[in-house]
Image: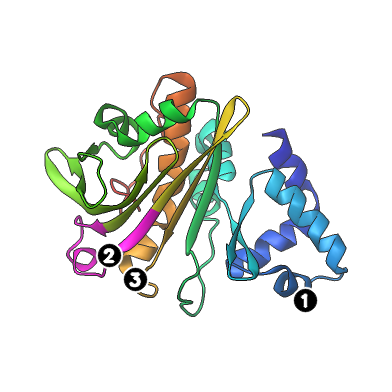
């Protein structure tokens, strides 16, 4: 967490995050064009932000695109801020920008978090209903975990998410479609896609979650924007402490779902 505060202490780095808040998924050239410094200066600041986990990158063709990663800020929320200023935290945990125009093929929500665990334990947390119930808004995941199989999340026995496994490599990668059933509008939308990627990094794992293939800025796109941060924070807390994350509940649309 020290790296997060050090990264945010520099005003130029805060401006870069503001630029990504305005429009996520920008290249180095796009970011540099609006900064009062040269290319290498921007690269240096972006590297600090990436090392602190405040942004992540994805290659799309020849371009390297930069995305806000709100998870570290959410962890600050979970540790301190929720005690004092929940309205402000609601804005911080939503530190993800919306593109003004849909861009096909570009990941829309990208999150990254480091968890002190093994790939096998992390995989079990993603695929075991006893674990998902403790961090995934109380839902229990069900599947036989084979490519092409159905994957559902049950909320008190009723399907909340209807998914299909598109790709699976245990303890490394899981790709599935995503249809939210908790809203008639979202249930009628074209399926989007969620990718979980696990990479061992010393005594920790880097978990990257990408939610993309939205049919524009749909109701699902807006609904899941805030919920993934809380899910990933809860997953980290459960694995590292053995206890579920307790967050003060406030009346908020989609609070009981990946919203």
Residue 155: which numbered mark, if any?
A: none
Q: Position of residue 13 (x, y in %)?
A: 76, 56
Question: 10 Å neighbourhood of mark 2: few (<14), some, or many (≥20)?
Answer: many
Foreground of the two, 90 or 120: 120
Q: Position of residue 233 (x, y in %)?
A: 47, 37
Q: CA distance from mark 3 to mark 2?
A: 11 Å
- Viewed as shown, does residue 69 lie left or right of 139? right
Residue 218: which numbered mark, if any?
A: 3
The region drawn magenta spans: 179-194
Which of the 4 image quarters holds residue 221? Answer: bottom left
Foreground of the two, 80 or 113: 113
Give SS at disc 2. Answer: loop
Q: Disc 2 designates what residue?
A: 191
Q: Disc 1 designates what residue?
A: 33
Q: CA distance from mark 2 to mark 1?
A: 36 Å
Question: 10 Å neighbourhood of mark 3: few (<14), some, or many (≥20)?
Answer: some
Q: Looking at the image, which residue is at 15% across and 47% down?
A: 159
- Is 191 in the magenta? yes
């Amino acid at each position: 967490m020290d790296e997060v505060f050090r990264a945010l202490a520099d005003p130029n780095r805060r401006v870069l995050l503001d630029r990504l808040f305005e429009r996520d998924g920008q290249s180095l050239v796009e970011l540099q064009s609006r900064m009062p410094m040269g290319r290498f200066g921007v690269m240096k600041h972006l590297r600090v932000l990436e090392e602190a986990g405040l942004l992540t990158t994805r290659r799309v063709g020849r371009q390297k695109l930069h995305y806000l990663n709100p998870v570290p800020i959410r962890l600050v929320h979970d540790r301190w801020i929720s005690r004092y200023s929940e309205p402000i935290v609601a804005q911080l945990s939503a530190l993800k920008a919306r593109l003004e125009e849909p861009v096909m093929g570009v990941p829309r929500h990208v999150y990254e978090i480091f968890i002190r665990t093994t790939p096998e334990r992390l995989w079990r947390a993603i695929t075991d209903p006893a674990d998902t119930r403790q961090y995934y808004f109380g839902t229990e995941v069900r599947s036989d975990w084979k490519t092409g199989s159905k994957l559902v999340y049950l909320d008190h026995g009723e399907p909340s998410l209807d998914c299909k496994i598109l790709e699976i490599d245990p303890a490394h990668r899981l790709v599935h479609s995503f249809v939210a059933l908790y809203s008639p509008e979202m249930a009628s939308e074209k399926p989007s896609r969620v990718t979980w990627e696990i990479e061992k990094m010393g005594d920790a794992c880097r978990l990257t979650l990408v939610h993309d293939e939205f049919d524009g800025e749909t109701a699902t796109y807006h609904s899941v924007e805030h919920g993934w941060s809380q899910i990933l924070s809860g997953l980290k807390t459960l694995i590292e402490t053995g206890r579920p994350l307790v967050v003060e509940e406030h009346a908020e649309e989609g609070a009981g779902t990946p919203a």
